[in-house]
Image (cartoon, coloured by chain):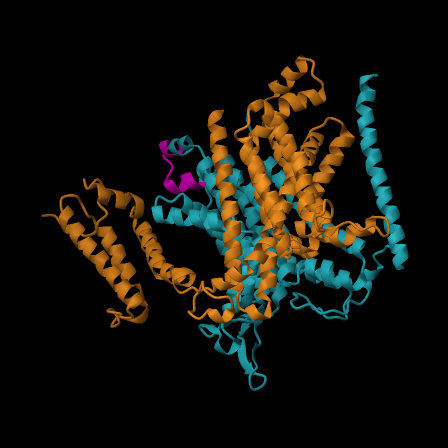
Chain colours: A cyan, B orange
Amino acid sequence: MSNKNKDLIPQVLTVLFIILVIIYFTINAQNNMGNRGISFGFGFLSQESSFDIAFSLIDYDGSYSYARAFLVGLLNTILVSVIGIFFATILGVTVGISRLSQNYLISKAAEWYVEIFRNIPLILQIFFWYFAALRALPLTIDSINFYDISFLNVKGWYVPRFIWTNFSLFFYSIVTAVILIFFLSKYAKKQRDDFGKQIPTLYISLGILLGLPFLTFLLGGVTLTFKIPELTQLSKTIYVYQGGVTIIPELISLALALSMYTATFIAENVRAGILGVNKGQKEAAASIGLTKGQILKLVVMPQALRIIIPPTTNQYLNLTKNSSLAAAIAYPDIVLVFAGTALMQTGRAIEIISITMLTYLSLSLSISLFMNWYNKKMAIKEK
Amino acid sequence: MNLNLLKPNKENLNTFVTTGSTLILVGFFDFFTSTFLDLNFTRFLPGGLSFLTPIILGVIGLHLIRIEFSGNRLLDKINTNFNSSNFNAFLSLLVIFALIKYIPSILNWFIFDADFAGNTKQDCTSGGACWVFVKVWLNRFVYGMYPDAEQWRINTSFFMLFALVGASFFTPANLKKYLLIFLLFIYPTIGFKLISGGDFGLKFIETGAWGGLSLTFIVSAFALILCFPIGMFLALGRRSKLPAIRYSSIGFIELWRGVPLITVLFMSAVMFPMFLPDGTYVDKLIRVLVAITLFEAAYMAEVIRGGLQALPKGQYEAAKSLGMGYWRMHFLIVLPQALKLVIPGIANTFLALVKDTPLIFVVGLLELAGMVNLAKTNPEWLGMAMEGYVFAGLVFWVICYAMSRYSQNLEKKLSTER
């Protein structure tokens, strides 16, 4: 048997096996759906959903379509992921640096934080915050008052609502500022590489970032007012806060658990990254006369970040996937809204589960593509 | 005499240490009285300042005793470990004060004010944790809805497992292979049959009744044993030079790694039955096991691939030069070394698997966390969520912490061996 055939046979067998499995599943699925009188298709997405969602970033009620419900769920997933990633990063970096502190108490405290929160299942932590900790908050009438601006009680956290006029102008000014800063840093790098000229990029960028939006307030007619939540009495015993934005307890507990859990992993990455920078690098930098700040900024951080960022992106991805545990406490994310309620109502298991899985899959794949690109860019270029 | 308050020096050691420690002691005294005795000496100061006095006094005191190379070993130790700068001094004080303030109330809730005696919620009167709840429900937390009279079957199969694992340490090396095969292939069948019953005069117990901590162990043990060989073949497939095999392995791995476990479980619950011939019913637990196994196999494959990649090329080349084929090369030379390299990674995957098992609640199987959820909604035991979750958290924490410690030790041991 020639070498080529030897390679060909297992491949053909694998492909055949996969095709056979797919055909088998398709035939069964067709039979099953035929028995139940439904046909495969995504037409149901435009039908009226006729169910309500407790928390939505965009206009939604039962008269909107299933596609709109999907979008609401997706936005809620993204919302809790972004909040979680933000706090997990801050907490994780703090704890990671604290673990390397000379201070015995601080490093021990950070170590125990990591050991405790990493080794308890995330779902249990979510349950704990939602069913045990947040349920211990006071009732609406005795809310915890933060300087008369926002209120925390068992129904959620009430914060002021921002009321903008000409918000789009303000938004575009920020986008312009970011683009300007991007070009500025490119220009500064070129100046430094070609002529050795240092441009105080940081201060100019800060100026642009603060100045441009400020100008829109002065000249563009942008105004911002706050509407503070007010306690109103609906009946003899029922009180509610009205006027502000309500952050529901589901969101609070989910964001809290996700960020505290993921922070432990980020902390370990940060620690490994900083420890991973060779001591000789710091000493060499000091010996050519760089200041402490310059050593950190120009020598330690670029090398530490190269170690820290890939596993940390992975953790961000894990956090996003873990946000699907929302379904356990009825936070209306994509799994609860779409794979839960919508599936129950339409009975279209194959279509809905595939859409949900594909959404997560494309999210994961796009982040890992970005990560590969970043790794390539940051990899040590040896000459 | 040169006394500069901003720069404590060695010449005036005694003066500085005495003043410094007095200030620190005053700070602590103020903190104690205002925390435990409700007696605030610094009441005359404006609100915020009075609250901060202990910390301000402490930081000044610690600043005064910060003398390098003082000659006093205790002082030097304190200074390097807790007091290397003003900021560190502040942080140390903050941690100490927080510990003093919160540890007693946590301990009170946990032990001193807690109730242990009794059998109903009404026996919990002292305001602390109501461990009576855990005591009464302990049987359910461990065995789920498994009938009381049949629980010896679960105990026996777990006892068998421990005995076998224990025996593996004492068996001679030439018999170890058979013991391992028995443990991996024959024991799971016996254990499963013993717990599910139906034959040999054992009462059949449907999987819906299984639950609690024992279900956590059953699911994680089976998933681990099953996902290992699948992960191994996927890892080999991903590194194969045959494109069809490589791409199908990559596709399979990335598909499972890209989606959350909960959607996979949803799939096994609602979508998978649609793919089987009409009327076939696959048991809920089996479906969950298959889903978790495939999911973890993808992660296991990546771990094993890491080991395969870390192995020096010379090993492959040496095996080939001896005339070994693909399978002989991998099973005799490459895999034994690669697997040894990634034992910590495998342990971490198993850890993640144990932490993922509570998710099986989506198909209606209740392991420990799910049982707690069920128990706390019992009308006779409302308001016991805190105790339940703290108990479940402690159990999981002990298991996972022990495992992570074990894997860290292994990692250390293996890294020094090289």
Quadrant of the snapshot with the C terminus of chain A: top right
**Residue closest to the far left:** B1
Instruction: Indicate yes or no whether the magenta region holds residue A355.
Output: no
Compared to A87, does A372 lie above or below?
above
Task: Compare residues A166 and A340 and report the one nearer the observer.
Answer: A340
Q: Is residue B112 left or right of residue B3?
A: right
**Residue closest to the far bottom:** A236
Q: Where is residue A195 in the image (x, y as percent from the top left)?
A: 49, 36
Q: Position of residue B263 (x, y in %)?
A: 70, 52
Residue depicted at 44% across the width and 71% down the height: B125
Quadrant of the snapshot with the N terminus of chain A: top right
Q: Can residue A175 be seen in this view?
A: no
Q: Main secondary structure of the magenta part?
A: helix
Compared to A41, does A267 lie above or below?
above
Residue depicted at 70% across the width and 69% down the height: A59
Q: Where is residue A356 in the image (x, y as percent from the top left)?
A: 73, 53
Q: Can residue B136 be seen in this view?
A: yes
Task: Compare residues A156 and A169 and report the one nearer the observer.
Answer: A156
Residue depicted at 85% across the width and 50% down the height: A29
Residue depicted at 50% across the width and 62% down the height: B387
Task: Compare residues B307 and A174 and report the one nearer the observer.
Answer: B307
Instruction: Indicate yes or no whether the magenta region holds residue A291.
Output: yes
Q: In this view, does A23 lie to the left or right of A238?
A: right
Q: Is residue A9 left or right of residue B333?
A: right
Magenta residues span A285-297
**Residue closest to the far front:** B201
Q: Where is residue A66 in the image (x, y as percent from the top left)?
A: 77, 63
The quarter holding residue A166 reads: bottom right
**How many numbered discs?**
0
